[in-house]
Image (tube, rainbow, N blue to C red):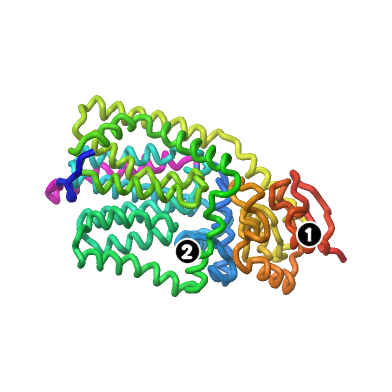
């Protein structure tokens, strides 16, 4: 592959023409964003990440503090978005955050369309926006339709590239910082931004200061030490390939195959883009490479990680299709639309057995406790707290933070010795000060089951089992 020019060609557009252009394109993109997110409204929850965020938002609304009274390995931007949405519409439903997710996808598509139009003209702008929305659903629906971290990270990454393309370095840096605050891997967009900046020390300084501004503000607004630990330094055991290597590899291959199927209409164009030097897209290839590294970071390969690849893929395909015959561009769009329809059908019709389990378990918890009673759920489904409307007995909302279990990781790296530093001492202190009314063992034979976790067995000695719901055992305190 030959070297490409640092700065791609730009098109000059008259203001009046631009107004008419967006007046015609925005309604199309808005309609397509609504259609592609339609399955997200079909279920109360899509995955545990949504449940985790919903519980976090409720705790924050009742005076809790991130990284102190509720913790997660994620930055604070998306929990704050959930908290704000719940403040406006209530926390009984995720409809408000689903609407925000539609707006996030629309914003990403508009920014990509604007970037493509500036580089390659009106037709390329329309192509980029439409292609992005069509392939954005090309994963398991629980990954593509959830209103979770990646969906809100993507507008920030697209904004960073949009600003860098216009040499607005400080704004590009701020967008990079916001992408990091949505999810740490969003910071990968810094690489193509720096590429566009080139050897300009003033530009590099403005990018750095811009990126540091929102991150520093978020650290100060929460707990600086806790922010640093939970978002950067405290995930060493989690980001490991040891344990269930074959399981993780199979997941990575499956999700790669799903996204490849969703991009079937783009593959010929992407192959041409790789061979040609006429696209002026070195920064886009770097964006794709950096995003691929972000997907692999931590060696988990969850499906929602792959959403980070979709913006650069859409732009690279657009770059190649701009010089292709109209029939080839039409074929790519139609193929992508057909693939999109298949994924939307999957999202509308596929059963969600884990959601059904969480709903049954939440009903049992609500029947055996009173509002305000603290509950400890020993499992990986924090949405049960939200569905039951019961406060958690600890800041650790899943057993994963106390055992390092995540996504099928097997026994070699699961246990109390792999917990987050100091987590068990904190848990003992919390439960001693305010014992939970009910403990739910939802391990169901997983590697973090009580017979493998000695501190949990000691805790359950003061409780007695009273019911079993789909394999989950409910324990109440002994009199």
Quarter of the picture containing the N terminus is top left
Q: Quadrant of residue 477?
A: bottom right
Q: Please report the bounds of the magenta region as a residue range.
A: 10-39
Viewer-proximal residue among 402 and 339? 402
Q: Is residue 348 above or below residue 12?
A: above
**At x 51% / y 45%, what residue is drawn?**
302
> In this view, which residue lies farthest toward the right?
479
Do residues under tags 1 and 2 come within 8 Å of each other at their CB atoms? Answer: no
Residue 185 point in image, percent of width and height:
42, 55
Quarter of the picture containing the C terminus is bottom right
Residue 444 point in image, percent of width and height:
72, 46
**At x 19% / y 63%, what residue is drawn?**
200
Horizontal arrangement in the rendering, residue 440 relative to residue 344 (left or right): right
Instruction: Give the class, few, some or many, for how many residues have Cα within 10 Å of label 1's Cα (few <14, many ≥20).
Output: few
* Camera sees residue 20: no
**At x 65% / y 57%, what residue is drawn?**
403
Residue 40 point in image, percent of width and height:
50, 44
**At x 34% / y 31%, what residue is drawn?**
267
Would you name the residue on which mark 1 appears?
457
Viewer-proximal residue among 96 and 254? 254
Instruction: Give the class, few, some or many, for how many residues have Cα within 10 Å of label 2's Cα (few <14, many ≥20).
Output: some
* Distance Cα–Cα, label 1 vs label 2: 31 Å
Q: Looking at the magenta stretch, what is its main secondary structure? A: helix
Viewer-proximal residue among 335 and 396? 396
Viewer-proximal residue among 177 and 61? 177
* Camera sees residue 63: yes
Q: Is residue 308 above or below residue 180?
A: above
Q: Is residue 338 above or below residue 53?
A: above
> Is residue 125 a member of the stretch shown in magenta?
no
Would you name the residue on which mark 2 appears?
232
Dot label at residue 7: none
Residue 154 point in image, percent of width and height:
38, 51
């Amino acid at each position: 592959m030959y070297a490409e020019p640092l700065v791609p060609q730009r098109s000059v557009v008259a203001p009046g023409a631009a107004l008419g252009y967006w007046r015609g394109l925005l309604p199309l993109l808005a309609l397509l964003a609504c259609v592609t997110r339609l399955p997200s409204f079909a279920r109360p929850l899509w995955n545990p990440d949504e449940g985790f965020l919903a519980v976090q938002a409720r705790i924050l609304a009742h005076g809790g503090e991130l990284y102190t009274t509720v913790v997660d390995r994620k930055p604070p931007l998306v929990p704050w978005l959930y908290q704000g949405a719940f403040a406006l519409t209530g926390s009984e439903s995720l409809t408000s955050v689903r609407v925000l997710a539609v707006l996030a996808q629309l914003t990403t598509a508009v920014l990509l369309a604007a970037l493509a139009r500036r580089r390659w003209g009106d037709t390329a702008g329309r192509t980029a926006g439409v292609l992005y929305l069509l392939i954005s659903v090309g994963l398991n629906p629980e990954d593509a339709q959830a209103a979770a971290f990646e969906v809100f990270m993507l507008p920030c990454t697209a904004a960073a590239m949009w600003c860098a393309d216009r040499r607005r370095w400080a704004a590009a840096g701020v967008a990079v910082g916001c992408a990091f605050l949505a999810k740490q891997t969003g910071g990968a967009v810094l690489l193509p931004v720096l590429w566009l900046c080139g050897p300009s020390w003033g530009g590099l300084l403005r990018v750095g200061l811009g990126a540091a501004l929102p991150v520093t503000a978020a650290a100060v607004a929460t707990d600086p030490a806790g922010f640093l630990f939970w978002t950067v330094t405290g995930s060493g055991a989690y980001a490991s390939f040891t344990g269930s290597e074959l399981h993780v590899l199979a997941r990575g291959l499956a999700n790669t195959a799903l996204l490849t199927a969703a991009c079937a209409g783009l593959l010929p164009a992407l192959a041409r883009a790789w061979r040609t030097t006429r696209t002026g897209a070195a920064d886009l290839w770097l964006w794709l490479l950096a995003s691929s590294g972000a997907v692999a970071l931590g060696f988990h390969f969850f499906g929602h990680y792959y959403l980070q690849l979709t913006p650069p893929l859409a732009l690279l395909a657009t770059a190649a299709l701009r010089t292709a015959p109209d029939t080839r561009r039409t074929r790519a769009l139609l193929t992508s639309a057909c693939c999109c329809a298949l994924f939307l059908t999957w999202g509308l019709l596929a059963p969600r057995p884990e959601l059904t389990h969480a709903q049954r378990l939440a009903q049992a918890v609500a029947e055996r406790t009173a509002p305000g009673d603290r509950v400890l759920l020993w499992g990986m489904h924090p949405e049960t707290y939200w569905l039951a409307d019961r406060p958690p007995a600890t800041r650790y909302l899943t057993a994963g933070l106390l055992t390092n279990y995540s996504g099928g990781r097997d026994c070699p790296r699961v246990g109390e010795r792999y917990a987050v530093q100091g987590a068990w001492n904190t848990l003992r202190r919390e439960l001693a000060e305010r014992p939970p009314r009910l403990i739910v063992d939802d391990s169901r034979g997983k590697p973090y089951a009580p017979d493998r976790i000695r501190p949990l067995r000691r805790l359950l000695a003061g409780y007695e089992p009273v019911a079993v719901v789909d394999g989950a055992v409910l324990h109440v305190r002994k009199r």
